[in-house]
Amino acid sequence: MEKKKGFVPFHEKLAYGFGDAGCNFIWSTISMFVTMYYTDSVGLSAAAVGTMMLIARLLDGFSDIGMGLVIDRTNSRWGKARPWIFLSAPAMALGLILLFNVPTGFSITQKTVYAYITYIFITAIAYTVSNLSYNTLLSLITDNQDERTTISSIRFIFTVLAIIVISTVSVKLIAKVGWSKLSIIYGLIALAFLMITAVFTRERNQPKEVKQQNCNIKTDVKVLFKNKYFIMISFMFIINYAGAGLDSGINIYYARDVLGNINHFALLNISALIPMLIGLMIFPSVAKRIGKWKSMFGGYIIRLVSLAIMAFASESLTGIIVATVIGSVGMVPMTAGLFALIADVVDYGEWTSGNRIDGLTYSAASFGMKVGTGIGTALVGWLLSYGHYKAGIDMQAASTIFAMKAIKIYMPIVLMIASAIIMYFLNIDKFSEKMNKDLAISRAQ
């Protein structure tokens, strides 16, 4: 049987998926637990934590753009992106360990400074290098859109499995071995998984004329910002991951203080992740049949319906679980489709300008993920502080409970509406067939 153009072996698709599992043993652990670690174990104020996270994410903007330029100018026997995954994986593991080991003998000021330094190191340096390289790798593995969608879906199956493990195991593991040993275990897992990606993937989508071009930075940036879809998808990443930052940052508080039992935290995550895991397995077929754009736009509608249900059942465990299951169905195309879509944005830039800018375009994804998550987690800290959250008490004030509901439900509604409006105009599917044919002819000449 003849292999289709851009075919990627199944073992390589799996190897790519391991990388995002590794990234999530860093990123999701930080998103889920670092606010509570800082407020309840280290003793920092929620407002100080929120400000720290926002400052770190603003610095990320510069590091993402810089790293994108570096990747575009990297030419090695390993390719453009894979060498940086090799180099950054140990730094990721070290960064997580340092983050969750604030010295107990420090004063509050010293703890705050230590938290700032280690948080900025892991998010603005180590994670930037690793995750931006990892995301860029998708467009370098193949130019086949169906294969990209499949790889992206497999990637997020690994992501969901990693988050299920983190969600169900971490609370008990923290109680048994503490924050320090937890960070060591997760750091080593992340290191191993990222190395699997670096070793067992290939960069085969590098046309000769693209590799040989020598555009300067000013030209690259000018070309990039003429790509209207780059602007749109940058905002999509910021908005979507702000919502993810809100949800992951508040869930452990919401389970304990609104639903009345911290053990509901794992249940909240499982009810979101199991339907998503199933959905990711069938998403490539759905996207191939009706297109990524229609799938993703439908996902926003489903997600908005789920948030409306959640608003009417905000203190009912059953109601929250039902709404979460429905919402996770909507999140499938929004999650897998978004990363497959940015590879199409890279192709669109090459199609319209003649210049292929992988790394700098993917900096939009990395920048949007981190700035969005930073805004979301910063808002968690600020709103908890505004609602007069107090660590170590059995019952929070009514103002604190309302703040938690605003973080979990009301603000995500606003974000989903904004993202759906942008998605309405971000339809590359309508000319993707012509674009791919033109690019194939151009590269063959």
Image (tube, helix red, strand yellow):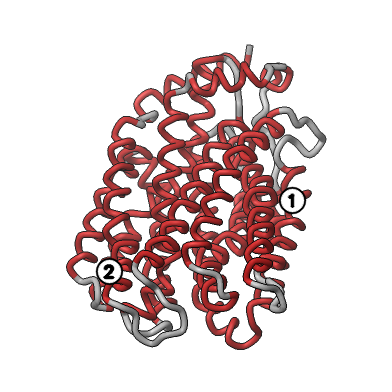
The residue labelled by disc 2 is 402
User: Which residue occupies 49% across, 16% down?
Assistant: 352
Q: Position of residue 77 (x, y in %)?
A: 82, 35
Which class describes the residues within 10 Å of circle 1: few (<14), some (14-19), or many (20+)? many
Q: Element under label 2?
A: helix
Observer-nearest residue: 239 or 37? 37
Which class describes the residues within 10 Å of circle 2: few (<14), some (14-19), or many (20+)? some
Relative height, residue 275 to residue 15 (above, below): below
- Of badges 2 and 1, nearer the viewer stands 2
Relative height, residue 265 to residue 413 (above, below): below
Whole-Å distance between the Cαs marked 2 and 1? 41 Å
Whether residues under marks 2 and 1 lie with C-beta atoms below 8 angstroms apart, the answer is no
Residue 60 horizontal side relative to residue 195, left or right: left
Q: Element under label 1?
A: helix
The dot on residue 285 is: none
Q: Position of residue 7 (x, y in %)?
A: 59, 38
Question: Quick one: quadrant of the C terminus?
Answer: top right
Question: Quick one: quadrant of the N terminus?
Answer: top right
Residue 47 horizontal side relative to residue 56, left or right: left
The amino acid beneath tag 2 is Phe
Q: Position of residue 365 (x, y in %)?
A: 52, 41
Relative height, residue 199 to residue 65 (above, below): below
The dot on residue 88 is: 1
